[in-house]
Amino acid sequence: MDVWALILRTGLYGGVVLTAGSAMLRLTLSIAQSSGFSRALTRQTAAGAVLVVLSSAGLVWLFLLAIAGGDAVLALSPEFFAIALQTPVGQAALFRVVGVVLIGLAAFAGSRWLMLIPAAILLLSFGWEGHSLSFGPRLVSMGLVMVHVGIMAWWLAVIPPLIAAPRSERNRMGHAFGRQALFAVPLLLLAGVVLLGLFTGWRLDLTQAYQQRMVIKLIAVSGILALAAANKLLLTGRPGFLWALRVEAALAVSILALTAWLTATGPDM
Amino acid sequence: MTRLLIALIALLSINTVAFGHSKMSGSTPEDGATVEAGLAAVSLTFDRKVRLTRVMLAAAPAEMTLAAVMSDVEALENQAEIGVLSELPKGFVEETEIDFDPLIPGVYKLHWIAVAQDGHTMEGKVHFAVESAD
């Protein structure tokens, strides 16, 4: 597997967490309007937008190189760009660029409701391409991917501002987020389980490389869930919360990388 | 309302398994075949529509046998390409023919690269020998 594809895809997931995730946080957490937290969300949205554009461009470049047999001149020709746009790979990259541009415009307009549209476009880009195209009813798998990636982005996007916030604000924010996460995280897991079922045909077969890789991801997911539960029930407002959040952030990055690995290699067909 | 519900269920149940990764289902000549001199086209068939993006045809050095070329995945990678006469199809097709000038006796490898409608990239090789007619 191409290590560049893995790096770029991890960057893409990170970028979508920071952009779409922040947009959804602004909507769901009224407390996120406080100036310090809002500034943190604006900064990470900008960083995420850069990540999305760079990683999308990089992934399209790898795709063009692959279909041109490594010929860089051919890969850069207008004909090959047109071919890319005929495929879900190019179309999804286009969605992402449009999504981050619209998020920038919505942020400029100061409308958190308007941000929901580009956030949805960003999420749609993941249902538009990849293995969700190949398994199960198209609209169902597309919807499940959007729910799964959307809640994941919303969850992980809260971690950096929580780490950066002053202690009192962190605790308030942690409590407010934790209450909503009680409802959102089960939905995230449900969407993930159904997607896994569609991708594997509801058959557990650990001799398959995809399912072995998925087990590794599930171990990391179990770790972050346990930590998030500990944060919610025991640590919020207590010493150790900040460190727990830092560990959660590290686990989040590893889960994004594992997801990139799973996506880049794909289920057995 | 009932119609709308039925239409929605029908739409949601469109199964896209058939949209999975495409594969080459055959070629003429077949991989590993020996054909008579004068061959001027290779046809490729896929189980689903693909967009061919590149086709490279190369001849092996005189001392290489067909078996040797087939067993070495890197074989002929740096050999000069033989010009292909036909343009590659501009759309997604299940079958296509690659034309070139009639081939002289020798061992050849046709390397193709394509992209499926789901964006999956694929490549493959067809090895064949052309022998003199006499």
Image (cartoon, rainbow, N blue to C red):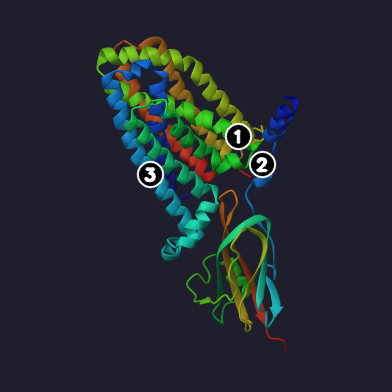
Q: In the image, is A116 to the left or to the right of B68?
A: left
Q: Amino acid at mark 2?
A: Thr
Q: Amino acid at mark 3?
A: Val
The percent coordinates of residue A222 (x first, y second) are 48, 24
Report in which chain the residue with disc 1 lies: A
Q: Toward the viewer: A98 or A134?
A: A98
Mark 1 = which residue? A141
Report in which chain the residue with disc 3 lies: A
Work out whether residue A4 can be spotted: no
Report in which chain the residue with disc 2 lies: B
Name the quarter where the C terminus of chain A is drawn: top right
Residue at image point 45% right, 17% down: A181
Q: CA distance from mark 3 to mark 1?
A: 25 Å
Name which of mark 3 and mark 1 comes first in the sequence.
3
Mark 2 = which residue? B16
What mark, if any, has residue A259 been given in the picture? none
Q: CA distance from mark 1 to mark 2?
A: 10 Å
| SS of the residue under disc 3 | helix
| SS of the residue under disc 2 | loop
